[in-house]
Amino acid sequence: MKKKLSANKEINLRPFSGPLLDGPHRAAARSMLYPVGFTEEDFKKPLIGIASTWSNVTPCNMHIDKLALEAEQGANAGGGKAIVFNTITVSDGISNGNEGMKYSLVSREVIADSIETVVGCGGMDGYVAIGGCDKNMPGAMIAMARMNRPAVFVYGGTILPGCLTIERRAEDCDALPSDAGRAGTPLPAATKELDIVSVFEAIGQHAAGKVSDEELHAVESCAIPGPGSCGGMYTANTMASAIEALGMSLPNSSAQNAISPAKLDDCRRAGAAVVEMLRLGLKPRDILTKKAFENAITVVIALGGSTNAVLHLLAIASAANVKLTIDDFTRIGKRVPVVADLKPSGKYSMSALVAIGGIRPLMKTLLDAGLLHGDTLTVTGQTMAQTLEGVAPYPNGQQIIRPLDNPIKKDSHLVIFYGNLAPEGAVGKITGKEGSRFEGKAIVFEGEEKALKAILDGTVKAGHVIVIRSEGPKGGPGMREMLAPTSAIMGKGLGKDVALLTDGRFSGGSHGFVVGHVTPESYVGGPIALVKNGDKIIFDSVKRTLTLDVPAKELARRKKAWKKPAPRYPRGVLAKFAAHVTSASEGAVTDRDLKL
Ligand code: FES
């Protein structure tokens, strides 16, 4: 494949840096670069950007400065001249449950815009982008798809689990959060693995009186032991796996610990790989085909990944001009089983999956079963099938990835619902542990905070469908994640007794009977805006229907009386986002229907 790509034409290795830096009339541009380390010789090399998302804002990205330096070395050793630059990041783990979380999805667009801005302005011929948190990963990918310059994505890697040592009696085994779902199989001795979701769930248990102040403090202070992305199959690990399946990161790079020799090596190889992409004439849109997105969806389903993958893959596809719809998730989901027993619904952390070989053996199994396209390209220049040749199976006796014929769920956990409550679709994460149907009475909240308070103070009871609205992309704005309410539901022990419906979205850490991305959202007058306390709501995940059991005539009356709320943010980045963002069922992107 490499030969075929490079033999086709004479490749200009400096299509953007050449016009920026060559010739007497560009002397001023060159003079600006000597002080940052350029030599005369460097001006003859392709200019390679290294987009770093380093920040001490969050542990997810605190090590990425060092990874960026490794990628810089790799690009230079590969024959390019690298320049490291930074973009922003925010932390959902910190912001969730707070007004600040409204900036989270917005940051995806800001990150895409900022990478596009620096790469475009700086005449970079190709680039590496290194991300380690939920929004900087799809943000980097959107920039790559938009710009279509040779580019490789590097994942910052997963965090290790926190480890809590506790004094406990046998009867206390279910008293702390990481025992959730492990009834009958408590951890040995007095240790337990924790992560950020453990803390959110401990808050609910604390409110229910099951966890003391001291225990909550113990969980809080040791859940996050160091650098790396949240450690279950939450959004970051889901997106890392999806990006590898898309072919946009190096093979075996999505399942690595943040602090590991393997991750440093991945960065060096990524720097060299982007120079090689230039030589091959290989660009992101050669890789980001419809089949590549189908591969990403397949891997996300098999791993039991986050609902955010739906939103982000739609957005990346939109930037790549690939026609991907939410219905593609249903089509693929009918034939792909969930086989990974990973948190939040399952038992194991990402680092446990890393220890048995990561996601490559699973991808090989999916390929051999005809569930993965083998002829898609990757950033290596090889096809997906070529990169999977010789991948060894998982070790005997491992419990994390099940065989395809004995899955955790025989079809997708990502369920696209339609119905009179969601005429343009909604996204649920239904693992089967919650059952396949839920019927209950609506209890309606305008915004997340009011819902969280009602869950914690006991207002929400078994049989309720919690409706959280005014949280959509436009109305929030920013489509906040409902991790605090879903974790509080779990912590209160209501996981099987209540359901949650929202025009917001979910963290990859959310689990339970939860359906989000309800479209049209309430701010634009979608049917979710018309729900009243006590209305009957029926979810059917087998038929994929979401029904508000209220007569059409009554709904028409409510619609007539409905008034569009005033925008919450008239100025600033939230206002800009709200003005431009498309529906969640189209990826909530901001650069599509711009009227120029
Ligand atoms: Fe960064 Fe979870 S908050 S990966």
Image (spheres, rainbow, N blue to C red):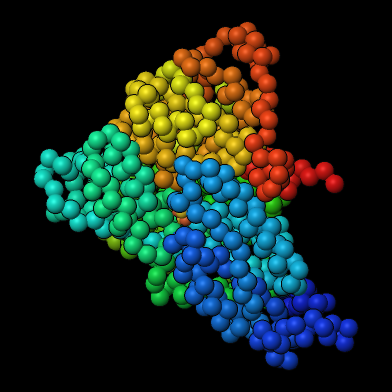
Quadrant where the image shows the N terminus: bottom right
Comparing 452 with 39, the one in front is: 452
**In the shown orientation, is residue 273 left or right of residue 169?**
right
Which residue is farthest right? Answer: 25
Comparing 43 with 473, the one in front is: 473
The percent position of residue 527, horizontal first and vertical second, equals 60, 22
Q: Quadrant of residue 509?
A: top left
The percent position of residue 487, horizontal first and vertical second, equals 37, 39
**In the shown orientation, is residue 424 left or right of residue 334?**
right
Which residue is farthest bottom? Answer: 40
Where is 471 relative to 368, above or below? above
Q: At 40% from the left edge and 75% from the top edge, which residue is drawn?
A: 261
The percent position of residue 431, horizontal first and vertical second, equals 39, 37
Q: Quadrant of residue 116?
A: bottom right
Q: Report whether residue 300 is seen.
A: no
Where is 201 relative to 522, above or below? below
Q: Report whether residue 193 is seen.
A: yes
Q: At 49% from the left edge and 75% from the top edge, which residue is drawn?
A: 66
**In the shown orientation, is residue 452 left or right of residue 594?**
left
The percent position of residue 549, horizontal first and vertical second, equals 51, 13
Q: At 47% from the left edge and 45% from the top edge, which residue is drawn?
A: 96
Comparing 233 with 90, the one in front is: 90
